[in-house]
Amino acid sequence: MTGAGALRGVGGRAVLRRNSGRVFLALCLAAVLAAVMALAVLLVTVTADGIGRLSLDFINSYPSRFADRAGIKAALAGTLWVMAFTGLFAVPVGIGAAIYLEEFAPRNWLTRAIETNINNLAGVPSIIYGLLGLALFVRAMDLGRSVMAGALTLALLVLPIIIVAAREGLRSVPPSIREAALGLGATPWQTVWAQVLPPALPAMLTGIILALSRAIGETAPLIVMGALTFVAFTPSGPGSAFTVLPIQIYNWISRPQAAFQTTAAAGIIVLLLVLLSMNAVAVGLRMYFERTRRW
Amino acid sequence: MSAGAIARERVAARSRKRTLRRAKEWPIYAFLFACAAVSIVTTLGIVAVLIEETANFFGEVSVVGFLTGTEWTPLFTEKHFGVLPLMNATLMMALGAMLVAVPLGLLAAIYLSEYAHPRIRSVVKPVLEVLAGIPTVVYGYFALQFISPEIVRFVFGGDTSLFNALSASLAMAIMILPLVSSLSEDAMRSVPQSLREGAYGLGATKFEVATRVVFPGALSGIVAAVILAGSRAVGETMIVTIVGGNQPNLSWNPLEGMQAMSAYIVQVSLGDTPRGTIEYSTIFAVGLMLFVVTLSLNVLAQWLLSRFREAYE
């Protein structure tokens, strides 16, 4: 009798253990589902709110006091200008830093300091970069609230991301390639420039696109740096005043009228479409080059 | 000259040429080093800028008054510079976001690392990455147009203000969830398979392996992920600016509007505050607080990762 009772006890515990496992799995699934649902609800809300406001006129109009006439022409042009210069500054410097750290840096305290520093910079809130841009580029270097000052601010912001991506690209090239080039008499720089960099570029490119898509969505640093919130012109050059898409959207969100909320939603759809296509290009590039890789 | 001597001479000439070529390359190496040094200059620049303006600020306001004052009214005629209301708002909203995002993120990470079929994983992971890539201004819109009216008002009654700390927390939770889940999933997947197999061999169920072998085995990475997510929430700006309420308010009630540190910086930046005024200096003093808090969290996370890294090889 006691034996059977003990057996039932063991069986009961096994059932309990199995059931608690099932409950736990259900919880895990629910968590994943919650995240996916959140994304779905967000996209549906924004689309439902803004799709009716979307038109060629919306993309081709300047902002206005009247919600139904307001458009994103100035903001879109500002975003393009700022991104072009951000890329111009951040990409060469980011790749240069990555090459130095990955290929040439001696293993000493300075290199370790630079690496730790890059890790820390990646965690600095973006609004702090805005304060840096305000004090350094806008005031000290006297660039004013210009495209140039905004681009430099964002370039510093995305630099750590580009460096990390570029280093991963360099690391994906096997050392045998370097050894072969060096063995044939190439100098270290010739090795990197002609043999390591070309196959590493695709992987780098993916990371660079993702870094720029991060910069496109940034609002706070540019507000703090002093970008304008109401601009009825497209920038005429790097010294021009500007606004960008996220700031324009924020400006509409912060107005009390419901019609401006709809306009903001339409702006968000455009912003998300731009980001989505950039991400699609990045993923496509990654897949294409993974298939055509030689090793 | 013998053939051997000629050959030696040629080799020597070639090697001289190579040395020369190398010597000509030094500007390139200098440029590459300069690129790497930009990061150091950036950090020094941030610290210098913040400290310089903060020093101006503390020329007029006492440090103790700033850190312990409970009233923040620098834009009024009667000025008070107590940062506690801003600090409290920042910490409350960040904590609220963590309370939601950490359990959900960890459960999602366990699912992806231990349970999910590879095909499901390859679908769910990119979806979470999309969440991480959505601009914060979009989350702000979502919080104001959906979370506040449809969720917070539904649960806590229709007379709740649209601008409240809870809505900001919930939106931030969605934003930082992918950060928690992907970093802790990485940590869990680095726990070696042999530990799992050993536990199965002793009769453990999948649930027990996940919670008593994998989770503790990855704990340092998980804690670091949680801290990094907290640091992100503390520094987050647009969500708390749009839906947080934007009035300094020292309160424990998450249904009230309050102003976070980052939101104050944006509020001042939107106005035209000339350089040299005390208002201009306040944003740098508040910025320095924000910088110190996030930097300490990041350093703590990195220290945890390097100090307690579970080395399995």
Image (tube, helix red, strand yellow):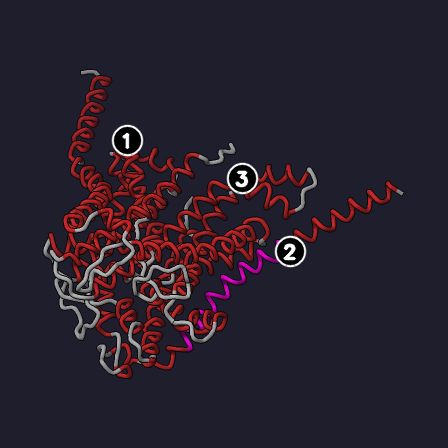
Circle 3: residue type: Gly
Q: At which x and y percent is residue B81? A: 23, 55
| Disc marking residue A109 | 1
Q: Is residue A209 above or below residue A14?
A: below
Residue position for label 3: B217
Image depth: mark 3 or mark 1 in front: 3
The reply to whether residue A56 is visible in this rendering is yes
* Residue B4 found in image quarter: top left
* Residue A9 found in image quarter: top right
- Give the CA distance from mark 3 to mark 2: 22 Å
Which residues make up the magenta segment?
A: A22-48
Residue position for label 2: A23
Side of A256 relative to B187 (left or right):
left
Q: Any magenta on residue B271?
A: no
Circle 2: residue type: Val
Tell me if label 3 and label 1 are in contact, CB under 8 Å: no
Residue at disc 2, secondary structure: helix
